[in-house]
């Protein structure tokens, strides 16, 4: 059955939101920054789960964009002027938001390196981005390279106006999963000074990305052509 592109996009977002909710409900809550009632670290079942739901509360102004919000990828540019829109390709990608003024970004760079390497095995590209204008004495691209993530970096071009408040005001470092059109599919705000918590956050981001990309592939993959009845069992001579 033919599905118009716009309706199909909304359908995909709906599938991914549902999958994320299911994953959250089934996931484990870890001891974490801004998460109440911490759970002891000695529980082996909690080594790979993190509940981002409290960080996405509407009470948190730094929570990031809503699922389905569109980011203008043409405004994110590399040092040579190439845009993220021209670089991202057709697959969904993960963006890590950083800021040279953020000490936590350097602390959390170990998790960024892990995510870039792990997500690459899922055919998901990892990009470093910033929506905040860096201080005049700092070259953003040199700063991004100094984090040692090994991923291309992009800075929001303010020539045509500032970024949306949801992105400019989002906590850093944070992560977003976006499709090739810049639609936000998953949002993971914040980090932690504790490495064990950062590790759990990273594991959860990988798990959520796997669920989301599998949903995308299931919807957009081309159906296998049916085999004609007369062709079954036929061999070439």
Image (spheres, rainbow, N blue to C red):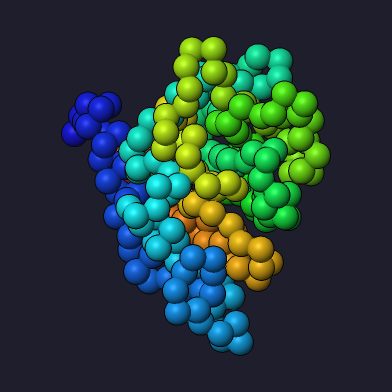
Q: Can residue 168 be seen in this view?
A: yes
Q: In which quarter of the image is residue 51?
A: bottom left
* Above or below: residue 13 compared with residue 159: below
Residue drawn 29% across and 55% down? 18
Picture quarter with the N terminus: top left
In front here: 54 or 11? 54
Residue located 33% across and 38% down the image? 68
Residue 79 drawn at (x, y percent): 71, 19
**Residue at x 45%, y 47% (from the top left corner):** 62
Q: In the figure, 177 relative to 104: above or below?
A: above
Q: In this view, does 115 lie to the left or right of 137?
A: left
Q: In which quarter of the image is residue 77?
A: top right
The x, y position of residue 134, in whole percent, is 66, 29
Q: Is residue 125 left or right of residue 108?
A: left
Q: Residue 200, relative to residue 9: is it above or below?
A: below
Q: Where is residue 102 in the image (x, y as percent from the top left)?
A: 66, 45
Taking the image as shown, residue 4 lies to the left or right of residue 85, namely left
Left or right: 94 with respect to 72?
right
Q: How many labels does the image show?
A: 0
Task: Name the residue nearer the viewer: 173 or 135.
Answer: 135
Query: Could you say where residue 187 lies in the image, as x and y percent from the top left?
Result: 44, 48
Q: Tell me if I can see residue 228 in this picture.
A: no
Q: Which of 90 and 24 is in front in this view?
A: 24
């Amino acid at each position: 059955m033919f599905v118009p592109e716009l309706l199909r996009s909304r359908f995909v977002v709906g599938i991914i939101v549902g999958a994320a909710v299911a994953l959250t409900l089934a996931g484990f809550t870890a001891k974490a920054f801004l998460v109440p009632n911490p759970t002891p670290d000695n529980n082996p079942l909690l080594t790979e789960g993190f509940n981002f739901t409290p960080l996405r509360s509407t009470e948190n102004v730094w929570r990031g964009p809503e699922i389905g919000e569109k980011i203008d990828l043409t405004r994110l540019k590399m040092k040579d002027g190439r845009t993220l829109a021209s670089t991202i390709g057709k697959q969904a990608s993960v963006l890590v938001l950083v800021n040279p003024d953020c000490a936590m970004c350097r602390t959390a760079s170990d998790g960024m390196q892990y995510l870039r390497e792990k997500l690459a095995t899922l055919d998901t590209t990892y990009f470093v981005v910033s929506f905040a204008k860096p201080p005049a004495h700092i070259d953003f691209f040199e700063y991004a390279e100094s984090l040692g993530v090994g991923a291309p970096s992009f800075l929001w071009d303010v020539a045509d106006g500032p970024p949306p408040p949801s992105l400019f005001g989002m906590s850093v470092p944070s992560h977003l999963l976006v499709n090739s059109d810049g639609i936000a599919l998953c949002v993971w705000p914040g980090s932690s000074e504790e490495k064990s918590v950062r590790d759990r956050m990273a594991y959860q981001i990988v798990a959520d990305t796997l669920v989301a990309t599998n949903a995308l592939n299931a919807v957009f993959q081309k159906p296998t052509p049916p085999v004609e009845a007369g062709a079954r069992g036929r061999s070439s001579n």
